[in-house]
Amino acid sequence: MSSRPEAHGVPSPCTSVCRMDEATGWCLGCLRTIDEIIAWSTLDDAGKRVVWRALDERRASGRLTAEPRR
């Protein structure tokens, strides 16, 4: 996870590489969808952890075009 401090304790997966992959619909930097990126600031810790688990699943899927930093 990122080492950036967050108001609620769950760090953002943002890597400041903000480009969307047309094939997957995921950000090439953090692997979030545009909806997840938009919702991030309003999610509670549990919701943010759900997103982090989805990112782990996306990494494991092998559908990546670039390896994101963590």
Image (cartoon, helix red, strand yellow):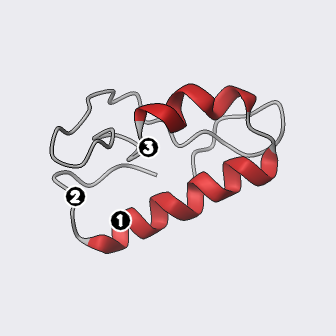
- Which badge, 1 or 3, comes first in the chain's sequence? 3
- Which badge, 3 or 2, comes first in the chain's sequence? 3
Q: Residue at x 72, y 49 (%)?
A: 47
Q: Quadrant of residue 50?
A: bottom right
Answer left or right for 49 relative to 70: right
Give above or below for 15 relative to 31: above
The CA span between labels 1 and 3 is 11 Å
Q: Which residue is mark 1?
A: 59
Residue 64 numbered mark, or none: 2
Q: Residue at x 63, y 33 (%)?
A: 40
Q: Position of residue 54 (x, y in %)?
A: 51, 61
Dot 1: element: helix
Local crowd size for mark 3, using a 10 Å CA cut-off: few (<14), some (14–19), many (≥20): many
Dot 3: element: loop
Q: Residue at x 41, y 43 (%)?
A: 30
Residue 32 numbered mark, or none: 3
Q: Are marks 1 and 3 in contact (CB under 8 Å)?
A: no
Answer left or right for 65 relative to 25: left
Dot 2: element: loop
- At label 3, the amino acid type is Arg
Q: Position of residue 31 (x, y in %)?
A: 38, 47
